[in-house]
Image (cartoon, grey):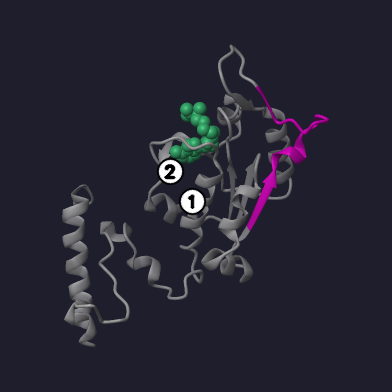
Amino acid sequence: MRIDILSAVPDLMESAFSHSILKRAIKNGLVEVNLINLRDYSTHKQKQIDDYAFGGGAGMVLMIEPIAACMADLKAKTVYDEVIYMSPDGELLNQGICNQLSLKKNLMILCGHYKGVDERIREHLITREISIGDFVLSGGELPAAVLSDAVIRLIPGVLNDETSALSDSFQDNLLAPPVYTRPADYQGWKVPDILLSGHSANIDKWRHEQSVERTKKRRPDMLK
Ligand code: SAH
């Protein structure tokens, strides 16, 4: 898979892709992530990529030219399955969307900044708009990193244990069961006996029951 992320401040995302699971996925060639600076496509002397909103009001708007030029340049070399704009008014991100996107080959993600991007970009150049929640962040960079992380960990081979993503919350419409590690007894706080029994069928059964219990209690809406 290839993910190209267009941003006014690409450095903001560097760290998200330089550690742990995502770093290894990139190193092993399971995904290629390109952080692209929109300023490289500005024709202004000062590398300007934003301007005042028509009609007045507070806040700058990302201009259409550098974004369109950047997209055209990328599209000349790659065919994209989706051109995604991160936006608080987009469809709310969930595991189903992540599963769907993890099967794609090439994704382009546009990060807005300030007041957002010129609406004509959304009308003509974007195929999908995704929100990470009903709150507003300063830019699309953290949302793009969130989306990329959630998608990349679903690519086969990215997680060490191939089945690991399948036992996470929201797969099968259930929350994950509780997990424990050593020590088995921390100052009297004990790990459930069943997990130390070595009986894998019973452990699987217990975990499933815990998942159902937890989902009933915390997210009954998921069981409908
Ligand atoms: N004026 C816009 C918010 C702009 S915030 C509005 O009220 O809808 C600046 C940028 O941050 C947005 O263009 C978007 O790319 C990103 N952003 C902010 N909150 C987000 C969220 N919840 N999900 C996805 N992207 C978000």
Q: Which mark is residue 132?
A: 2
Disc 2 residue lies near ligand 1 with CB under 8 A:
yes
Q: Vertically, is 58 above or below 193? A: above
Q: Taking the image as drawn, is residue 207 in sight? A: yes
State the residue at coordinates (31%, 57%): 170
Side of 145 where 205 appears, left or right: left
Magenta region, residue range: 33-51
Q: Position of residue 119 (x, y in %)?
A: 57, 25
Q: Residues within 10 Å of mark 1 (few under 14, many from 20)?
A: some
Mark 1 falls on what kind of element?
helix
Can residue 224 be seen in this snapshot? Answer: no
x and y, in percent, of residue 196 in the image: 23, 85
Quadrant position of residue 22: bottom right
Instruction: Using the rendered view, name the quadrant where residue 202 is placed.
Output: bottom left
Q: Is residue 82 magenta?
A: no
Compared across the picture, whether 212 is left or right of 111 comes to left
What residue does disc 1 label?
146
The amino acid type, in three-letter code, at marker 2 is: Ile
Q: Residues within 10 Å of mark 2 (few under 14, many from 20)?
A: many
Q: Is residue 115 left or right of residue 63?
A: left
Q: Residue at x 80, y 31 (%)?
A: 46
Mark 1 near ligand 1 (CB under 8 Å)? no
Under tag 2, what secondary structure?
loop
Query: Of all residues shown, which one is farthest toward the front?
Result: 187
C-beta proximity under 8 Å, tags 2 and 1:
yes
Instruction: Give me the residue at 61% from left, 26% from top.
Output: 61
